[in-house]
Image (spheres, rainbow, N blue to C red):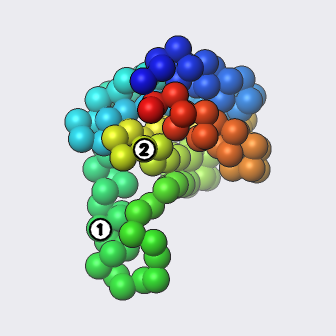
């Protein structure tokens, strides 16, 4: 793992989100422990890990024609939907979880620009 490249990618992501990134962690799928972060939240890592696993299990049990693995999970929270949780499977060992302030981070930029740029960089750095 190239920790410097992972940290550089996290810094670039934060810069691209116009102050809307509340927290971001790259964490182990097996332990839920963070390996790199900006404003790390160990509890969030563990909960994001459980949440994504349960969503995947639920989708499989539902019989919906969805791929076996979930690559990205986006959840909008709160009465006004101002908080978004994004979890991305990066490799067979790591996930990335982030909390966004939707009043500042533009969802279109996050989904169309930031994630497509950052995910391949993260995957390469985590090999």
- Residue 56, position as x, y percentages in the image: 35, 64
Mark 1 falls on what kind of element?
helix
Q: Is residue 103 left or right of residue 88?
A: right
Q: Note whether residue 60 is visible.
A: yes
The relative height of residue 124 versus residue 108 in the rendered view (above or below) is above
Residue 57, which numbered label? 1
The relative height of residue 30 versus residue 76 in the rendered view (above or below) is above
Q: Quadrant of the N terminus?
A: top left
Q: Is residue 93 left or right of residue 97?
A: left
Q: Give the residue drawn at x 52%, y 54%.
A: 72
Residue lying at the far left in this picture: please name it.
31
- Residue 95, position as x, y percentages in the image: 42, 41
Mark 2 falls on what kind of element?
loop
Report the front residue among 107 and 36. 36
Q: Quadrant of residue 104?
A: top right
The relative height of residue 49 versus residue 61 in the rendered view (above or below) is above
Report the front residue among 71 and 109. 71
Does the CB distance between marks 2 and 1 fall below 8 Å?
A: no
The residue where tag 2 is placed is 91
Q: CA distance from mark 2 to mark 1?
A: 18 Å
Q: Give the residue drawn at x 29%, y 68%.
A: 57
Q: Is residue 63 left or right of residue 82?
A: left
Q: Give the residue drawn at x 44%, y 32%.
A: 127
Q: Is residue 79 left or right of residue 58?
A: right
- Residue 114, position as x, y percentages in the image: 70, 39
């Amino acid at each position: 793992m190239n920790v410097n490249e992972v940290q550089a990618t996290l810094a670039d992501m934060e810069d691209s989100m116009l102050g809307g990134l509340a927290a971001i962690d790259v964490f182990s799928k097996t332990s839920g422990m963070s390996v790199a972060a900006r404003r790390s939240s160990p509890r969030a890592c563990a909960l994001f890990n459980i949440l994504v696993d349960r969503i995947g299990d639920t989708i499989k049990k539902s019989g919906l024609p969805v791929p076996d693995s979930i690559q990205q999970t986006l959840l909008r929270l709160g009465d006004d939907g101002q908080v978004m949780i994004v979890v991305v499977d990066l490799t067979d060992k790591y996930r990335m979880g982030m909390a966004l302030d939707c009043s500042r981070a533009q969802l279109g930029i996050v989904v169309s620009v930031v994630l497509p740029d950052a995910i391949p960089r993260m995957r390469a750095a985590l090999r």
